[in-house]
Image (cartoon, rainbow, N blue to C red):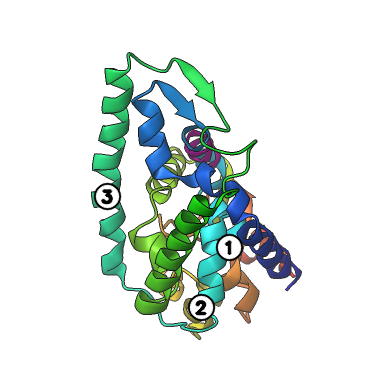
Amino acid sequence: MRQQKIRKTLLLISMLLFPVTLNYFSPYLIVQGSFAGIATGSFLLFAALFGFSLVFGRAFCSWLCPAGGLQEACSQVVNKPASRKQNLIKYLIWLPWVLSILAGFMSAGGIKDLNPIYFTDYGISVSAPPAFITYFAVVLLIVSVSLIFGRRSFCHSLCWMAPFMVLGNTLKNKLGYPSLHLEARTEDCISCKKCDRACPMSLKVQEMVQNRDMNSNECILCGSCQSVCPKKVLRVGFGAQKDSVSKSSYTEGA
């Protein structure tokens, strides 16, 4: 499917650019900057991702995230489903981390400066030997978790960006305004479970279809389930949210 080729190409480009963008995803630099009263590039990016998720959910994870690209490459080696039990771990990490950021800004007397290229060399994250050590350590962590615990396990368990987007996704789903979302024609489902096997987040998509509940905070709106569905039951679309829709409400996607 053309959509998946485009998505995977964007992930590949993002993954190749990771040495440039690494520090913009750094949880440590946010904390370090906060105690100096500086809103770093990573602080600004995470704030932007929260805003992005209010309309597009977790689509960033499936279309542009370099860690996502690394994990999908790992799934070509180890493609076992990830356990749902992993999902709680990221929140246990995220909460004290966010509190430390707030403590940092409070101790510094608030945000005093904006520095999008904080701790980079003219915007490039990895430009000196010590930075390569950090880069390879991060890559090793992402790859190791994915290979040991299953598809996109880093997203489920350790990603410090995911809770921001989960929060935004939860808000958009609760408020129900037009947004990017997954919907299904439940009556046409033949329970082949091809969607389950294709889902990079190891979601039980067929169960979601049967339960007429397509809202999952772990769904990254990649469209993989849509691509493999033989009956075109599933669709990632933009508009008012409808978990289960009639056959005439959308045309079959390519």
Q: Amino acid at mark 2?
A: Ser
- Residue 65, quarter of picture: bottom right
Q: Residue at x 59, y 71 (%)?
A: 224
Q: Give the class, few, some or many, for how many residues have Cα within 10 Å of label 3's Cα (few <14, many ≥20).
A: some
Residue sitting nearer the eye, 130 or 182: 130
- Which secondary structure, mark 2? loop
Residue sitting nearer the eye, 71 or 246: 71
- Residue tagged by mark 2? 75
Q: Which numbered disc covers residue 222?
A: 1
| Residue 48 place in picture, x, y as percent | 53, 35
In this rendering, the label closer to the viewer, 1 or 3 = 3
Q: Is residue 19 left or right of residue 105?
A: right
Q: Is residue 113 visible?
A: yes
Residue sitting nearer the eye, 46 or 247: 46
Q: Residue at x 56, y 53 (%)?
A: 59
The C terminus appears in which quarter of the rendering?
A: bottom right
Q: Is residue 185 visible?
A: no
- 48 lies above or below 110: below
Indicate yes or no whether the magenta region holds residue 207. no
Q: Is residue 4 left or right of residue 102?
A: right
- Residue tagged by mark 3? 93
Closer to the N terminus: mark 1 or mark 2? 2
Q: Magenta stretch?
A: 45-52
Q: Is residue 165 left or right of residue 60?
A: left
| Residue 15 place in picture, x, y as percent | 61, 61
Closer to the N terminus: mark 1 or mark 3? 3
Is mark 1 in CB contact (under 8 Å) with mark 3?
no
